Image: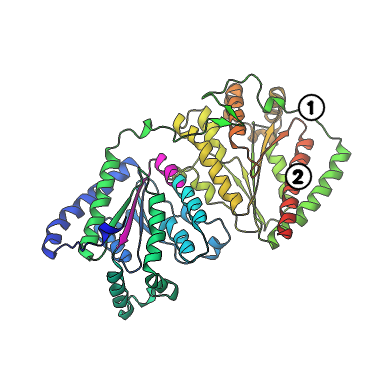
Amino acid sequence: MFATAKIGRSLSKAAYKAEVENLRTELLEVQIALRERDIPVYLIIAGMEGAGKGGVVNTLDEWLDARGVHVHAFWDESDEEKYRPRPWRFWRAMPRRGEISVFFGGWYLWPVEQRFAGHWDDVDIDQCMRGIRELERMLINDDALIVKCWYHFSEEDQRRKLKALARSDRSRWKMLPKKSKFSEQYQRFEQVADRVIRATDIGRAPWHIIEATDRRYRDMMTGKILLQAIKEALADTSQDERPANDAPTIANGELLPDAPEAQVTLIDRIDLDQTIERDDYRKRLDSLQAELNELSWQAYNENTSTVLVFEGVDAAGKGGAIRRVTQAVDSRLREVIPIAAPTDEERAHHYLWRFWRHVPRAGRMVIFDRSWYGRVLVERVEGFTSHDNWARAYLEINDFEEQLTGAGIVVQKFWLQISKEEQLARFKAREDTPYKRYKITDEDWRNREKWDDYRDAVNEMLTRTSAQHAPWNLIAGNDKRFARIQVLEIVTKALRDTLKAKSKS
């Protein structure tokens, strides 16, 4: 794969000067067009040590309008990053629509280093690359442009370049001991890089191998590749006609129709008549909250994070259930994130961006009052997003939650259900009670008119996104007290089991 990056390509000073002015002009023009089309651009700059990756980015910074370019290096791991899942650092650096983010190494640097250092084997690296392919497909399906450049040269050229860098005071900081090891085992590093590039050279995000021996040739090729990629993205008029990227059609061994019309759904099977006596409720509440308080501090001491997701029909009692959890957990250890319509800043990013931002650091708990499931519920039913967007969201959400649990986070999801009759009674009670009146809106009444549409959407959501590592818990909510006890029992059990298993490992 790298043979074409070792043949000695170069560009004379005169040829470079003749081309660079037009290239810069065109790059600025397409950068303006990007903003008008709201296309986010991810530019991955990766390659051999000493290949001049920093020089490339500095050159692009001169050629482009720096106000729309953001550069991110992922060399050091901050305390914030250390105590969160690894993808968190990339999600918080995602570009706004119409802007360009330059990622030094991107999501490739760390896995390459892990394999090169011998911490991973081929199975580990291949599994990681599968996750990266899915991430890139997800971003592309959200109209992003991903441009990946790998800078390469011969072993002799690298040795000469690194010697020159070592003598330079301005570059000496780059020559860290762990970095110098790459030059000592050139061929081994090249083999790792070859495996990574071949595994992630996908059609809409191909790798561009650029010979880095000559600075002018290297920079000019990078500029031309970026320009051509942006032009093609701007010319693409079929973005709204893309397939759903293999959205899953199989769940529990059964083929799911595009628009489920099942007469009996999962939520229809919830026994809504379940109740608890007031005295029993008080005893159970005190006992469970005391246990949850102890478990939350134990989780803090053992760096175990928790994510709780609350969804349900309007007036089902999500707020009351959440309050019974927060009453038990010290306010320094937990945070409640209420999810409403996205802000302008949130709309300027992938829809999962705002949720990745709130992933808890190790030992903390985050409670989502509504969540990423809005994509397959309200956005689907109300027509706020296209069929393709919500259809592929099941796969994207499953992958997101798998990354959370893969990082050791406890994930529990709750769907609170009440009958249509109970909902009507609660709506009327809210209208008749002054201090509850703020809870009822015209939107609640409009949603009620689409009860059956939401029921079908919920059924498909539950079927496609309930997994052993991130299960849906169906809560009978006609009796508010019973619902609260159900939630507390599930949360305490999940934490208890996780901490017990962790102590044995």
| Magenta stretch: includes residue 150 | yes
Q: Which residue of the protein is positioned furthest toward the right in this rendering?
A: 279
Q: Which residue of the protein is positioned furthest toward the top in this rendering?
A: 263
Within 10 Å of disc 2 (Cα), the crowding (few <14, some 14-19, many 20+) is many
What's the CA distance linking mark 2 and mark 1?
19 Å
Does residue 384 sit above or below 365 in this rendering?
above
* Mark 1, secondary structure of its residue: loop
What residue span does the magenta drawing correspond to? 135-152
Three-letter code for the amino acid on which mark 1 is drawn: Asp
**Any mark on residue 338, and which?**
none
Rendering coords of residue 53 (x, y %): 32, 64
Residue at image point 42% right, 60% down: 192
> Quadrant of the image for the C terminus?
bottom right
Residue at image point 53% right, 61% down: 81
Does residue 371 sit above or below 172 in this rendering?
above
Three-letter code for the amino acid on which mark 2 is drawn: Leu
Rendering coords of residue 82 (x, y %): 55, 62
The reply, left or right, for residue 27 in relation to residue 239 is: left
Residue at image point 56% right, 51% down: 358
Within 10 Å of disc 1 (Cα), the crowding (few <14, some 14-19, many 20+) is few
Question: Label 2: which residue?
Answer: 488
Residue at image point 76% right, 39% down: 486
Rendering coords of residue 430 (x, y %): 69, 31
